[in-house]
Image: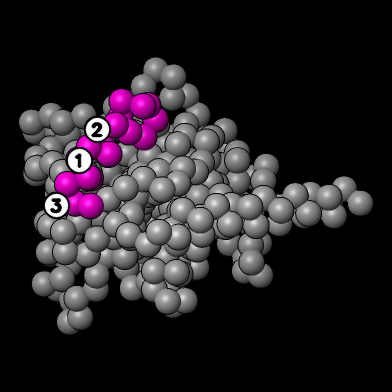
């Protein structure tokens, strides 16, 4: 699929023409979950004083839709983490074609190191993004902690880059990813954009992150993805409200112009 966004051309491939993410990109002519991505861009730009972030993580990168946007418009470097071999094939191709500064880790993230396997729910037909990792001794998928990955990366780099933001979408395993990222949360306090499909999942994530000083300030995307931040500014929510209002007006005007 070839499309243009913000004056740039992109090419993304998927596992099949019927895949949910692929069909949304094809029908919309733009990135999947564009509302979330544009909001992430706004948040990280404010955090970095108008500059690109040094490093942003895409945990559960799937075919690379979010990673390509992040690596083009949000961060100088993107770290994409995806355990499903079927998705990793497209992920490598999409990042190779669209980005320069990126690293792919074909593993799962969890509370501790181990192994697992890919599980596809019965209702996941034509939706590769619903794949999840089930822990299993001797399984083919390696499970690591995020802190382990970041420590390993910093040891290999001449310059240590703080993690400015993290998008986490791992089909109900988000809390386990966070539990394996305590050092990163305490050291870098990144902006967090976390999917939580149910109220119970959200409540567990909120309770865990409160210890680190995080609070939920916004929600985006069809499957709710929540922004958690440690910023204490009294005007944070007001700024977000104004951003949402401006965005709504912008896209409403675009639709009206398109109909004219």
Magenta-highlighted residues: 196-213
* Of 135 and 17, the residue lying toward us: 135
Q: Distance between the residues labelled 2 and 1?
A: 6 Å
Q: Number of marks in the image?
A: 3
Residue pushed farthest right?
260
Residue 240: image location, x then y, percent: 51, 55
The circle on residue 204 is: 2
Q: Residue at the location (15% across, 31% down)?
A: 135
Relative placement, left or right, of 206 versus 7 is left
- Could one spot residue 91 in this view of the protein? yes
- Asked if labels 1 and 2 touch by Cβ distance under 8 angstroms, the answer is yes
The circle on residue 5 is: none
Q: Residue at the location (19% across, 76% down)?
A: 160
Q: Distance between the residues labelled 2 and 3?
A: 15 Å
Q: How far apart are marks 3 and 1 (CA)?
A: 10 Å
Q: Crowdedness of circle 3 by 10 Å Cα count: few (<14), some, many (20+)?
A: some
- The answer to which of marks 2 and 3 sits earlier in the sequence is 3
Is residue 208 on the magenta stretch? yes
* Of 58 and 178, the residue lying toward us: 178
Q: Crowdedness of circle 2 by 10 Å Cα count: few (<14), some, many (20+)?
A: few
Relative placement, left or right, of 259 versus 28 is right
SS for tag 1?
helix
Task: Identify residue for label 1.
Answer: 208
SS for tag 2?
helix
Which secondary structure is most common in the magenta stretch? Answer: helix
**Quarter of the figure with residue 112:** top left
Task: Identify residue for label 3.
Answer: 182
Q: Residue at the location (27% across, 50% down)?
A: 214
Residue 191: image location, x then y, percent: 34, 57
Is residue 207 on the magenta stretch? yes
Q: Crowdedness of circle 1 by 10 Å Cα count: few (<14), some, many (20+)?
A: some
């Amino acid at each position: 699929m070839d499309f243009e966004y913000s004056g740039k051309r992109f090419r993304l491939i998927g596992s099949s023409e019927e895949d949910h993410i692929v069909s949304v990109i094809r029908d919309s002519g733009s990135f999947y979950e564009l509302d979330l991505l544009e909001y992430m861009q706004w948040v990280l730009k404010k955090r970095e004083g108008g500059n690109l972030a040094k490093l942003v993580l895409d945990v559960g990168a799937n075919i690379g839709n979010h990673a390509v946007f992040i690596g083009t418009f949000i961060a100088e470097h993107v770290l994409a983490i995806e355990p499903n071999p079927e998705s990793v094939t497209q992920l490598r191709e999409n990042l190779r074609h669209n980005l320069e500064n990126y690293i792919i880790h074909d593993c799962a993230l969890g509370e501790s190191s181990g192994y697992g396997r890919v599980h596809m729910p019965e209702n996941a037909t034509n939706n590769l993004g619903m794949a999840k990792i089930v822990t299993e001794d001797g399984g083919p998928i390696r499970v690591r902690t995020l802190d382990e990955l970041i420590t390993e990366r910093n040891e290999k780099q001449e310059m240590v880059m703080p993690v400015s933001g993290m998008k986490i979408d791992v089909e109900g395993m988000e809390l386990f990813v966070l539990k394996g990222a305590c050092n990163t949360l305490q050291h870098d306090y990144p902006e967090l954009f976390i999917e939580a499909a149910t109220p119970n999942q959200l409540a567990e994530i909120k309770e865990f992150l409160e210890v680190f000083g995080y609070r939920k300030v916004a929600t985006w995307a069809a499957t709710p993805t929540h922004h958690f931040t440690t910023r204490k500014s009294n005007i944070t929510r007001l700024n977000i409200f104004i951003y949402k209002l401006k965005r709504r007006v912008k896209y409403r005007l675009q639709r009206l112009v398109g109909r004219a």
